[in-house]
Image (cartoon, rainbow, N blue to C red):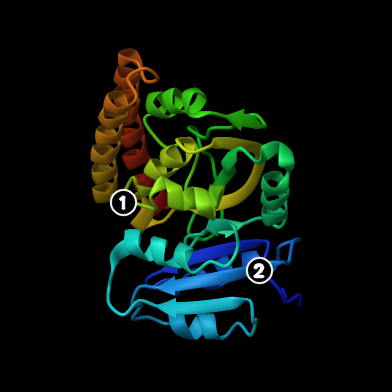
Amino acid sequence: MVIPTKSPLISVCIPTYNGAEFISETIKSVLRQSLQDFEIVVSDDGSTDETTKIIKSFKDERITKIDCLQRVGAEANWNNAVAIANSSLVKLLCQDDIIYENCLESEVAALSSGDNADCSFCFHTRDLVTASGKYMWDPIRSDFPNRKYSLKDLLPQIVRSGGNPIGQPMAVTFRKDSFQKAGCFHGEFAIDLDMWVSLLEVGNGLALGKVLSAFRVNSNSWGTELSKQQFEMMYDFNLRMRAKHPNIVTRLDSVKGRLKCFIRTCARRFASRWVFRN
């Protein structure tokens, strides 16, 4: 075991609420990292299941658990976890997702390079897995080549995609000071995508061109009701980006994105019925 004697190279923040089913596997994926100079910050939003017991079963001094005094919701819980991170680099990892063995090493190396000092975050490609851990085909996965991307480069692609091509939180590591300048997480179901755009407004994004994590698909993340809410949030996001950045996002980008958003939502509903039936 390697216990850092100074600020760790990276803070892995895990916001949780009733995460007993998968949080052990999530934490283990961090402990298996090739880079061991990290801390794990778990922010618990009032779990009523075995989450606390599971976290306490890990006898590792790099793990810190904080408890919200009352239910605050996902957005505030995410911000709470990041607020107490001791490193200048932060990875937000949801309670049921996993990162691969060389994930932290790749991200820290990328953001520590002087050539990438202008980057506020880096991101990578992620796999999709079922609740049981089986890999799923992802027909809408975005694979970005390894290079820097500005707001002007990425925002039109994001809007046209009708989704979140940068990825869920586990696919991103950001600089804490850039996060604070960007205004922290805000919103509801599009909180991650809104933050990625806010980070692009204060610096470049660096695509690593590697698959370094897995997003776990379950009934909570792919349910029909959530799909409807996410469609509404993405539709609103599309219109807001067109209004906020009219010189970057064209009318055609906006129209294509709204159509793609509808298609993605239909595909997701179909996939959720198939996945959770089998």
Q: Is residue 234 left or right of residue 178?
A: left
**Looking at the picture, which amino acid does disc 1 mark?**
Gly
Would you place residue 36 above or below residue 89 in this image?
Answer: below
**Looking at the picture, which amino acid does disc 2 mark?**
Ser
Q: Residue at x 67, y 56 (%)?
A: 104
Q: Which mark is residue 223?
A: 1
Would you place residue 57 above or below residue 89 in this image?
Answer: below
**Mark 2 highlights which residue?**
7
Would you place residue 161 above or below residue 11 in this image?
Answer: above
Q: Is residue 152 left or right of residue 111?
A: left
- The quadrant in which residue 7 appears is bottom right
Looking at the image, is mark 2 or mark 1 nearer the viewer? 2
Q: Nearer the viewer, residue 19 or 189?
A: 189
Picture coordinates of residue 17, whole percent (x, y) = 37, 71
Task: Please indicate, yes or no, whether residue 95 appears anywhere in the rendered image.
Answer: no
Picture coordinates of residue 212, whole percent (x, y) = 64, 48
For marks 2 and 1 on the same chain, the one whose residue lies earlier in the sequence? 2
* Quarter of the image that includes the N terminus: bottom right
Q: How many marks?
A: 2
- The quadrant in which residue 162 appears is top left
